[in-house]
Image (tube, grey):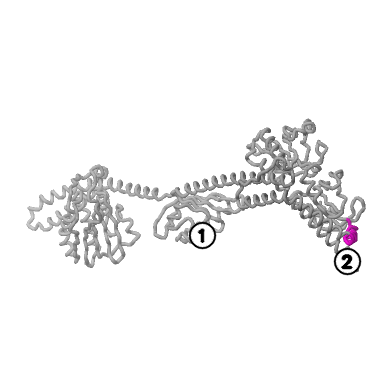
Amino acid sequence: MAQNVLPDIAEDRYKEITDETVLRIQDQFNNITLEIQKLGRKFHSDEYIDASVEELGQEIKNIVDYSPFVDSGTIVETDGWISGYYPNDLEAEVKNANFSNRDYMKNAIKTKEIYISHVVSAVTDRFVVVVAIPILDGEGNVSRVVNLIVRIGENPVFNSILENIQIGEGYAYLVDRNGHLISHPEANRIGEDVTANAVIQKVLNKQSGYQEVVNTQNIPMLASYQYIPVLDWGVVAQVPVSYTHVYFETFQHSLYLISFILFLFLSIFTALYTKQILKPIKDLELAVGQVAKGNFSKRLELKREDNTEIGRLSRRFNEMAEYIEDAREDIVAKESLVMHQKEFLRTVLDSNPNFIYAKNSKGQFTLANQSIATFFDTTVEEMMYKNDKDVNPSNEQVERHSQEEQIVIETLKERVIEEELLINNKGEKKWVKTTIIPLVSIASEEIQVLYVSNDLTERKLTEEIIRKSDKMSVVGELAAGVAHEIRNPLTSIQGFLQFMKPKYNDDHYFDIMLSEVERINLIVSEMLVLSRPQVEKRELKDVREIGSSIIYLFESQANLNNVQIYSDFDADIPLIWCEENQLKQVFVNILKNAIESMQDGGEILVQIRKKSDSHVMLRFIDQGIGIDQDRVKRLGEPFYSTKEKGTGLGLMISYRIIASHKGSIEITSEKGKGTTVDIELPISFKADELSDSSEEY
């Protein structure tokens, strides 16, 4: 039973060994492939766009001299003729050779990508693997092809990988995508077609596994096989079936002898080479540790005559450390440039007064500039990956934006919202014209939308000013015409009434008619204020005296309407530079409106305060019926009045008078509670400001 079990155990053991072997070989060739592709990508980068043959030839020389994987290289024009090569011993073989019909040339030119060939027979009668690298010009077309060549039979890395495989009397070999031997212990078989082998057929079908096969010498073999995807190659490791029996028979007779010889050999070897090997190994270990910690400037001291494996390994280590250091410096420089560009773009974005932001397909902010963050009283960081409804208080606008986004994402077409009003949580308003642009990410294929909202607020205000100015112009022209047409007949009527009055004993009715004619004449005079220049005489005046005189003037009318007028003036009010009669006209208009708004009587409070060192404040507070909020903003427009028979001209004239004094009027009102009128006037202003502000009244 033991005799049956031991071969089975040995078979399982050799399956483990061969499986481990093919996987190790696969990993080694994957690493080799990645290194070769890395070398190829250097040629394929922007650095070698439109590179000359001399530049390409120098880089090939560097790679052949320093890379253990590449044995030679050629530069081939797109018509197949050689324009450069290294080493120079290739001259005789490639001088008159044309490579236009080679598959690797065709694939590299067609795909514009790096292509690794199967095993081919070169013009030098060697079996080689070719890495074809297309060199692109500035327009993206292939200008020539660089071929990095691995000589399978001569390359020390390829040979050492398989030569160092110890699996008893077994061996390992490689096949390419066409079933040709790439590497084999029997060098004369390299390039042989072995597609008839059952294991090779499975490898060509991209399978991996373990099975018993018969080799070309009709010897039963236990074979592990593995498909290598990155190369489209296969690796096979196999041992004779009979060797599983011999293994244990030999083992029983030679175990002690081998153990003794091995011990003796190792003892002698250790004694002879410990001193020679231990120090460079220790140095190499320390150097590797330094590089692992990021000290890429670390180098080993080398002896020129040291051609041992440790010496060669040390030289390779120095080359690797130098390459890593150069690459790291290049990466650091590029990262610094990218960071600088990112900060610059962020500065440009945040300095733009318009709103610029982007959202993903879920409606979350992925980009925002400082302007929109400030308007919505938040920060750029807080806006990231939040939805529109988290910052925009207008649900209607949020819904509209969501609908527009879906249309842009579905159609991939730009849309424009000509005008929209944005309102933040503080009630601040901003008119904008918004352009919505689709953005498609090449990497993730995700569609985002970019918003660019241009500020229209100043334009809207300008349009409003122009609209009011046009109204004023029309009012002025109308007032001039009406006043002219009324005053002529009015003068005649007034003259005849005065002429007829002495002839009648009862002149009561004449007094009434003359009073009404005078009132009409006053109204006409007010209309003329809108159409022709008035003579101004500005002086330093006490605004308290002006206010007191008007309050005194209105006391009788106020008493008739059951209205009490109270005054509250600060004692330290400075003199102001003004036109007294014009300010009186403003006070008359405001007090008259206040009394007329209190049909059931009430109180009016007139306050004069020093607001600052440069301005005084006049406040009129009544207890009238009040005004709706939507009507307050239209006060001061011509022909707009809250009274049934009002013309709106009184407040309009008041606004213009205060504006000519570099002041402002603010009206606040609440329905059913009353109205407050605040007038702010500067204490004084320069003569040139006065001349600039002179308007026609």
Most foreground residue, 304 or 157:
304
- Specify whether residue 466 is in view: yes
Residue tagged by mark 2?
A: 5
Mark 1: secondary structure = loop
Q: Position of residue 81 (x, y in %)?
A: 75, 33
- Specify whether residue 78 is in view: no
Q: Position of residue 266 (x, y in %)?
A: 79, 54
User: Which is the main secondary structure of the residues drawn in magenta?
Assistant: helix
Q: Is residue 675 left or right of residue 24?
A: left
Residue 127 against residue 10 in the figure, above or below: above
Q: Which residue appears at 34% of the width and 61% of the height?
A: 629
Residue 243 on the magenta span? yes
Q: Position of residue 468 (x, y in %)?
A: 33, 49
* Amino acid type for the residue under numbered disc 1: Asn
Residue tagged by mark 1?
A: 387
Residue that extends furthest to the bottom in the rendered view of this protein? 1
Q: Which of the image's four quarters has the N terminus? A: bottom right
Mark 2: secondary structure = helix
Most foreground residue, 345 or 624:
345
Most foreground residue, 327 or 287:
287
Residue 413 on the magenta span? no
* Amino acid type for the residue under numbered disc 2: Val
**Label 2 CA crowd tier, 10 Å (few <14, some 14–19, many 20+):** few
The answer to whether the residue labelled 1 contacts the one labelled 2, judged by CB atoms less than 8 Å apart, is no
Q: Is residue 376 left or right of residue 200?
A: left
Residue 31 against residue 140 in the figure, above or below: below
Residue that extends furthest to the right in the rendered view of this protein? 218
Q: Which residues are magenta?
A: 240-253
Most foreground residue, 218 or 199:
218
**Label 1 CA crowd tier, 10 Å (few <14, some 14–19, many 20+):** some
